[in-house]
Image (cartoon, grey):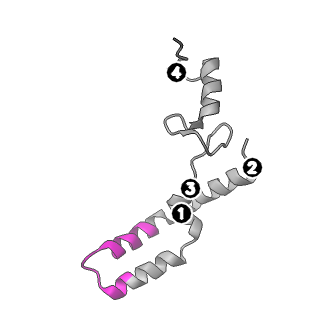
Amino acid sequence: MASKAKIARNQHREKLAAKYAKKRRQLKKIVSDPNASMEAKYEAIAGLQKLPRNSSPVRIRNRCQVTGRPRGYYRKFAMSRIALRELGLRGEIPGLTKSSW
């Protein structure tokens, strides 16, 4: 089980990323525009640097929704391999069956 502080920090990053997504998208569009002037690009870069560091979507970590574990994460199920195995063995995940040979 991950510490509650790590989970809360990640949720805070998700909120910040959603809050600043539109502004970040606009500034990045200016930076990558070949027709924009150098002054506009420098202003856009400065604007990006003024945004909170945790508002970048790159800083969000995928975590298991059951345990908060950051490693062994399956995107399809939004949980870690350990939680997936436990719930799968109990039959709580529809369409998932244990294979044996």
Per the image, the residue denoted by label 1 is 19
Residue at point 32% right, 72% down?
A: 32
Q: Are circles 1 and 2 on residues that touch, CB within 8 Å? A: no
Per the image, the residue denoted by label 3 is 60
Q: Quick one: SS at disc 2? A: helix
Furthest residue toward top = 101
Residue 65 sits in quarter: top right
Per the image, the residue denoted by label 4 is 96
Amino acid under label 3? Ile
How far apart in space, not on screen, are marks 4 and 3 (Cα)? 28 Å
Residue 29: say if magenta.
Answer: yes
Amino acid under label 1? Lys
How far apart in space, not on screen, are marks 1 and 3 (Cα)? 14 Å
* Coordinates of residue 62 in the picture (x, y in percent): 57, 47
Q: Quick one: SS at disc 3? A: loop
Amino acid under label 2? Lys
